[in-house]
Image (cartoon, rainbow, N blue to C red):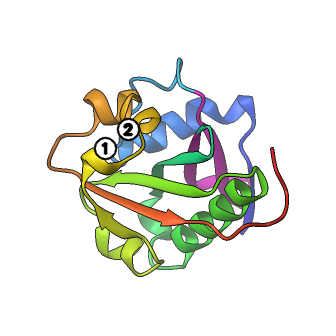
Amino acid sequence: MNLRPATVAEQNAIRALLVEGALPVDDLDEADVRFIVAERDGAVIGAIGLQPFDRVGLLRSLVVRAQARGEGVGAALVQALEAHASERGLERLVLLTLTAAPFFAARGYAVMARDDAPAVVQASAEFRSLCPASATCMSKMLPPTGNSR
């Protein structure tokens, strides 16, 4: 498995994978979401997005193809995204999830009140309209790397 930044040519494949996983895509043409993909044998088998806001990042849309689940692809994508975010100088990641709270809790993310998320993140389409109020909001502080954006 190879983890790498997504290419422009892969945007449609990523969108299809997100739709297949019932994840939001309505704002992807306008939002600054940068994806990392997991690739095996030339095919994208997973993706995760980062939408940066100042020193905070919104973790967007972790998705793994059904046939690749249970193989550590999701965990590897989260780890790669956290490293990338930290290298960019981001200090914290925030996410919303309907189904994956236990997965993220096992990786150090803590549940927080949605209203306690940074204002810049709350202003995103993901927070305002794409994810229902029933979604669990979670956050994780990232270790400093000494690098900045």
- The foreground one among 16 and 91 is 91
Q: Secondary structure at mark 2?
A: helix
- The foreground one among 143 and 63 is 143
* Residue found at the far right of this picture: 147
Does 101 appear in magenta?
no
- The foreground one among 75 and 32 is 32
Seen in the image, is 98 located left or right of residue 10?
left
Tell me which secondary structure the magenta stretch mostly adopts: strand
Crowd rating for badge 1 (residues with CA inside 10 Å; few <14, some 14–19, many 20+): few
Tell me the amino acid under the disc marked 2: Val
The residue tagged 1 is: 22
Q: Is residue 82 above or below residue 118?
A: below
- The foreground one among 145 and 59 is 145
Crowd rating for badge 2 (residues with CA inside 10 Å; few <14, some 14–19, many 20+): few
Horizontal and vertical percent for residue 108? 46, 77
Report if residue 100 is visible in the image: no
Q: Is residue 93 above or below residue 34?
A: below
Horizontal and vertical percent for residue 70? 45, 79
Q: Quadrant of residue 73?
A: bottom right
The magenta-colored residue range is 32-52
The residue tagged 2 is: 19
| Quarter the C terminus occupies | top right
